[in-house]
Image (spheres, helix red, strand yellow):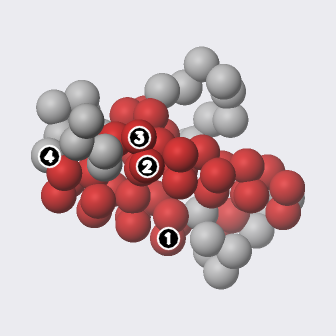
Amino acid sequence: MFETTEAQNYYDILDVKPDATQSEIRQAYFRVKSAYSRDSAALYSLFDEQETQLVLERVEQAYLVLSNSE
């Protein structure tokens, strides 16, 4: 399950390997974002709205960094 610790790296957040391709990173981003969306019934009892927002912000940051080719 998604941990909300500061020590978690971007690869862990998107659940990809460090040698993941751009396509794999993009697919992982959409998969994780969908899993932690507000519409996810699985998250209803696990995270409150503030925690869900934090998770989604970390997912966005991870995608921005890992999808940057530089």
Q: Do the residues under discs 3 and 4 have CB atoms within 8 angstroms?
A: no
All told, the count of numbered labels is 4
Distance from disc 3 to disc 2, alpha carbons, whole Å, reads 4 Å
Q: Amino acid at mark 1?
A: Ser
Q: Residues within 10 Å of mark 3 (few under 14, many from 20)?
A: few
Residue found 54% across the figure and 26% down from its top: 8
- Residue for point 39% across, 66% down: 30
Q: Are marks 1 and 4 in contact (CB under 8 Å)?
A: no
x, y percent for residue 59? 53, 50
Disc number for residue 65 = 3
| Residue 64 disc label | 2
Q: Quadrant of residue 27?
A: bottom left
Q: Secondary structure at mark 3?
A: helix
Q: Earlier in the sequence, mark 3 or mark 1?
A: 1
Residue bearing mark 1: 34
Residue at image position (46%, 59%) is 32
In the picture, measured across the screen, residue 22 lies left or right of residue 55, that is left
Q: In what element is the residue under mark 2? A: helix
Q: Are marks 3 and 2 in contact (CB under 8 Å)?
A: yes
The answer to whether 18 is drawn above or below residue 61 in the figure is above
Mark 1 and mark 4: Cα distance apart in space: 20 Å
User: Quick one: quadrant of the N terminus?
Assistant: top right
Q: Is residue 57 visible?
A: yes
What is the three-letter code of the residue carrying label 3? Val
Query: Which is more N-terminal, label 1 or label 2?
Result: 1
Crowd band around label 2 with a 10 angstrom C-alpha radius: few (<14), some (14–19), many (20+): few
Instruction: Tell me the residue that label 4 is attached to.
Output: 21
In the rendered image, which quarter contains the C terminus? top left
Mark before the other along the chain sequence, 3 or 4: 4
Q: Is residue 13 above or below residue 23?
A: above
Report whether 28 appears left or right of 21: right
Q: Amino acid at mark 4?
A: Thr
